[in-house]
Amino acid sequence: MTERLTTTDLGRDFGAGAGVSGIDLTVRAGEIHALVGLNGAGKTTLMRLILGMLRPGDGACRINGRDLAQLRASDWARVGHLVEHPLGYPELDVRTNLLLAARLRRIPAGTAAVLAEQALTELDLTRYATISTRRLSQGNRQRLGLAVAIQHHPDLIVLDEPTNALDPAGVILLRTVLSRRAEGGAGVLVSSHHLDEVARIAHRISVVNRGRLIGTLEPAAVDLERAFFALVHDHEQERLP
Ligand SMILES: Nc1ncnc2c1ncn2[C@@H]1O[C@H](COP(=O)(O)OP(=O)(O)OP(=O)(O)O)[C@@H](O)[C@H]1O
C-alpha cells in the first residue's frame, strides 16, 4: 500500500525534557491516522516537523517517498495542512482567499475557481463567499482554513485539532470531507483531544505522551478513554526511577 507519510526516528529536543523523539509513524493512502495525547504531549511539534515548519534534530521524514529536504514546490502543492492559525488574509473575502491559496499551488485559474466553489459547498461557506475574512466568526475562519487545506485534493492532509471552534454541524461536515478525501486516496493525519470523535473517523489511533509514540488504540474499542489513560499511566510509571 502507498505510504503518503513515513517518519523514522524523528525528533526535536527543546531541552528540559520538552520536544519529541524516536517517532516512527506512517500514514498510508486511504487512511485516516489520528494522534491523541494530553496537552503538551508533542502532537503539534510532530506535525510542524512533518511539514518542515521546524527543523528536526534527529531522524527522517518522507512525503510520498521523498525526503523532506528533497521536496519541490510541486510536491508541497500535493500537501494540505492546518496547523496553528487558519490561513486567510483578513482583508480579502473568503472566495478570494480560496482562489489565492489554489493559485499559490500553481493550479490554473479555471480549475482553481471550480475547486473553490466545491470547497465553499463542502464546508458550507457559500453564504460567506463575499464576506471579508476579518468579519468571519472564529468557527467560520476555521472552516475557511480547512477549506484551504483540502480544496486541492491533496495526497497528504495534516490537521492539528481541526474541530477547534467548529459547531456540531461543522464537525459532521469535516468528518464527511475527511472520509471522502481518504476514500479518494489521500492519507490524513489528524490530532484531536476528542476520543469519541476520533473513533468515528480514524482507521488508526496513535497515542503521544511526553514526546513519544507510546502505543495505539483500537478505534472500535468499547472504552477508549480507559484504554488511553491506561497507556499514559503505564508510560508514566515506566519513567519513574
Ligand atoms: N518552540 C518551542 N520551544 C520550546 N519548547 C517548545 C516549543 N514548541 C513546543 N514546545 C514544548 O514542547 C512540548 C510539546 O508541545 P506541543 O505543542 O507539541 O504539544 P501538543 O501535544 O500539541 O499540546 P496541546 O494538546 O496542548 O496542543 C511542550 O512541552 C511545549 O511546551
Image (tube, helix red, strand yellow):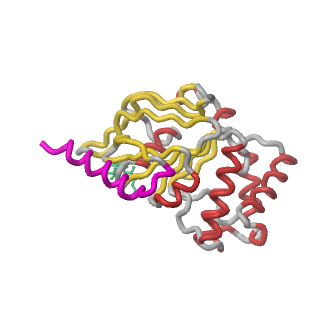
Q: Is residue 30 visible?
A: yes
Q: Is residue 84 visible?
A: no
Tell me residue 217's x, y (percent).
43, 47
Q: Quadrant of residue 131?
A: bottom right
Magenta highlight on residue 240 = yes
Tell me residue 36's x, y (percent).
43, 51
Identify the residue at horizontal 75%, vertical 57% (top origin).
Answer: 119
Identify the residue at horizontal 66%, vertical 41% (top origin).
Answer: 186
Side (left or right) of 98 relative to 30: right
Quadrant location, the C terminus = top left
Q: Is residue 214 above or below residue 194?
A: above
Tell me residue 177's x, y (percent).
68, 54
Nearest the viewer among 52 and 241 is: 241
Q: Which segment did they paint magenta?
A: 219-241
Specify the farthest residue to the right: 110
- How many numbered discs sit on the rendered protein? 0
Q: Mainly helix, strand or loop, the magenta region?
A: helix
Magenta highlight on residue 58 = no
Quadrant location, the N terminus = top right
Side (left or right) of 232 relative to 97: left
Specify the farthest residue to the front: 222
Specify the farthest residue to the left: 241
Tell me residue 25's x, y (percent).
47, 35
Identify the residue at horizontal 71%, vertical 62% (top origin).
Answer: 123
Identify the residue at horizontal 29%, vertical 46% (top origin).
Answer: 18
Q: Quadrant of residue 224?
A: bottom left
